[in-house]
Amino acid sequence: MAGNAFLLSIIYLLVGIAVEGARRVYPSTFVQRLSLSLDALPARALEFVGAMEPLRRVYLNGKLPEYQVRLIFGVTTVAIIFVLAFVVGLIVGGLRSYVERRALRKYNQGGRG
């Protein structure tokens, strides 16, 4: 579970670095839209917890450089990936346990009769 989340986080961060580099070197509409789509997940998560508006205000006032905003978005996304991996792991583990217990009950009932 943690290994998959770690791998997915690394892939996301590498894609983000590549897109950010492309955005600076080759600022096309496609690259700009790709960058915005990568920023959508952490922006919505930060908005959900009430942190996006203060972050936006500080950034627009010039008190927070762009690289720090990118760093905050990256950390937020990695946290989301790990939380999702944990939740999915709990659900799958619970379902697996349920199926195993049910199969064991059927086996025990069949063996006694």
Image (tube, rainbow, N blue to C red):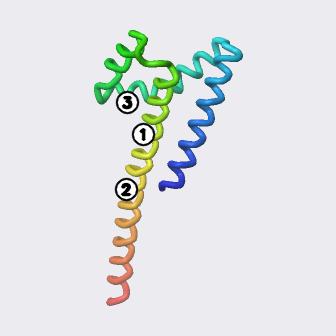
At label 2, the amino acid type is: Leu
Q: Mark 3: which secondary structure?
A: helix
Mark 1 or mark 2, whichever is nearer to me = 1
Give the alpha-carbon distance from disc 2 to disc 3, as whole Å: 21 Å
At label 1, the amino acid type is: Ile
Of marks 1 and 2, which one's residue comes earlier in the chain?
A: 1
Query: Which residue corresponds to the image point at 65% horizontal and 17% vertical from the top-left?
Result: 24
From the viewer's perspective, is 80 left or right of 7? left
Count residues near mark 3 (Cα–Cα under 10 Å), then give few for <14, some for 14-19, many for 20+: some
Of marks 1 and 3, which one's residue comes earlier in the chain?
A: 3
The residue that mark 1 highlights is 80
Location of residue 63 (image quadrant): top left
* Image coordinates for residue 42, horizontal then vertical, percent: 43, 29
At label 3, the amino acid type is: Ala
Give the alpha-carbon distance from disc 1 to disc 2, as whole Å: 15 Å
Which mark is on residue 33?
A: none
State the residue lying farthest toward the top.
61
Choose between 73 and 105: the one closer to the eye.
73
Choose between 29 and 23: the one closer to the eye.
23
* Image coordinates for residue 53, horizontal then vertical, percent: 32, 18
* Image coordinates for residue 79, horizontal then vertical, percent: 42, 41
Which mark is on residue 90?
A: 2
Of marks 2 and 3, which one's residue comes earlier in the chain?
A: 3
Query: Which residue corresponds to the image point at 41% horizontal and 64% vertical from the top-left?
Result: 96
Query: Which residue corresponds to the image point at 62% horizontal and 33% vertical from the top-left?
Result: 15
Q: Mark 2: which secondary structure?
A: helix
The residue that mark 3 highlights is 45
From the viewer's perspective, is 85 left or right of 29? left
Identify the image quadrant of the C terminus.
bottom left
